[in-house]
Image: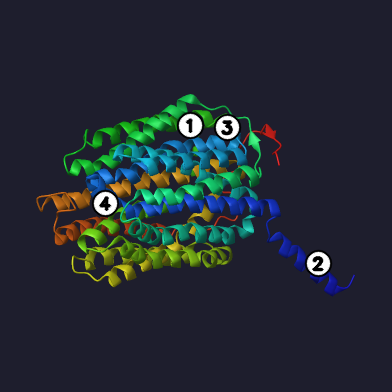
Amino acid sequence: MSHSSTSEGATASAEQADRLDPKSRRVLVLLLAAVFVVFLNETTMAVAIPTIIADLGITAAEGQWLTTGFALTMAVVIPVTGWLLQRVNTRPVFVTAMSLFTTGTLIAALAPVFEVLVVGRVVQAMGTAIMLPLMMTTIMTIVPMHIRGRIMGRISMVMSLAPAIGPTVAGFLLQAFDQQWRGLFFVMLPLAIVMLVLGVVLVPNVTETRVIPLDALSVVLSALGFSTLVYGLSSIGLAAESAALLPPWLPIIVGLGFLAAFVFRQFALQRRDAAFLDLRTFRAHTFSLAIVMFSLAMLMFFGFVITLPIYLQYALQQPTEVIGLVMLPGGLLMGLLGPFVGRLYDRFGPRPLVIPGALVISASVWAFALLLGAESSVWLVAAIQTTLFLGFAFLFPPLFTASLGALPMHLYSHGSALIATIQQVAGAAGAAVFVALFTVALATSGTTDVTVAQPADIADGAKLAFLAGAFVSLGIVVTAFFVRRPVAPEIPDVSLPAEAEVPAH
């Protein structure tokens, strides 16, 4: 055989090694499409909240429950996915998730009152809670380590497009439906139905399952711990306007107590490799560090998602379609940069990406806190928001890839569940703290009703919330200097031999 033939054969083998097989590509495309739909649903809601507040006659703190109630449900359900993804195959998990999401969308679309709308959001959240860990675990299982950065970049692109176009789509749909927010859910419903049908017909089973018992005590402790903690965090905003049923510190302490009991229970179960949510993931230094950085980023991100539209609508007096357009460029930039950032990760690792990303985020948030007011230009807001999302574009894909890459394969599902759970708790905390600070500052004007407050007072409330985010961003900057790329799992594969079932195809 000639040298040129040998080189051609080696090149072809290398190209083949850089590609996924057809079955893996199919499940990846379908999972990305489903996650796009559920993310699109979440970001359209952010723009619709001010309209819902006005239409249903609720306060900003009550409207917060459309996002924090969603986060609360996610925090309760996601830990179960650590067990579910090991016990049940890919297709039935996908179908279950999309069935719940579709049902919740229908309930929300038909909701006659605010309480029923919250119920619909809760059912939606149950499906969303399963979908995100399913995607992350499946990808870590089917994608070779040397191209994970590239694939994560593509995932980041798809996941960023929903936040990019969601607010804009919501703004124009609200305008088209004459500010009738139910139209958003009626538009989302056929998309959810299509993904459900495609899942039933096309999603293959690509993971192996193990016979693992479900520890009922862990389920109870997890549900009580996360739900009461998120409830306490969400009550901070209500307490700021004297509307909370309980002082927030009480459910927060109770929730932390249940979570402490949950942690000790997992330590006991880990000795026989039967943990409900395996906390040995935190023995991986890179995973732990990435989780800290990711938590701070999500706390700030969710806080901005709920505060910025209120500031734009009630302080700057902008219509919903303009609010959507203001938030469009940053999300598009974040999405378009995803594949590029992924390739940079594969070549250079996370640190050259997350350090400048963290610095850009911090600079943007400080600009929000110090420069904005009741007379600010919408163009200035759009410019700062775009710069903020540029920073997030260089932060999230490397953190996802590095954190899960530090784990052995049998802990992928647990790591994915932990990332998604902490994301929701951090998000609830961010939304709660931002809304509480906004409400406290607004209360000094004599009212907490954003529909009657003066634009200057609303701007002052938003600036106080943004200032809290600015201080949080300093923690992201410090942590960024310590993130590294794992070249192999940082903890040994200590799993017991699995009673594996052959995946059905």
Q: Which residue is mark 3?
A: 273
Q: Are marks 4 and 2 in contact (CB under 8 Å)?
A: no
Determine the secondary structure under disc 1. Answer: helix
Q: Which residue is mark 4?
A: 434
At x 55%, y 58%, the residue is 152
Nearest to the eye among marks 4 and 3: give it: 4
Q: Is residue 456 visible?
A: yes
Nearest to the eye among marks 4 and 1: give it: 4
Name the residue type under label 1: Gln
- Among numbered discs 2 and 3, the one appearing first in the sequence: 2
Number of marks in the rendered image: 4
Residue 89's label in the rendered image is none
- The correct choice, above or below, for 484 with respect to 107 in the image is below
Name the residue type under label 4: Phe
Q: Are marks 3 and 1 in contact (CB under 8 Å)?
A: no
- Among numbered discs 3 and 1, the one appearing first in the sequence: 1
Mark 1 surroundings within 10 Å by alpha-carbon count, few (fewer than 14), some (14 through 19), many (20 or more): many
Q: Quadrant of residue 474?
A: bottom left
Measured in 3D between alpha carbons, the distance from the residue under mark 4 to the one under mark 3, in whole angstroms, is 40 Å
Name the residue type under label 3: Asp
Q: Quadrant of the C terminus?
A: top right
Q: Which residue is mark 1?
A: 266
Determine the secondary structure under disc 2. Answer: helix
Determine the secondary structure under disc 4. Answer: helix
At x 28%, y 71%, the residue is 380
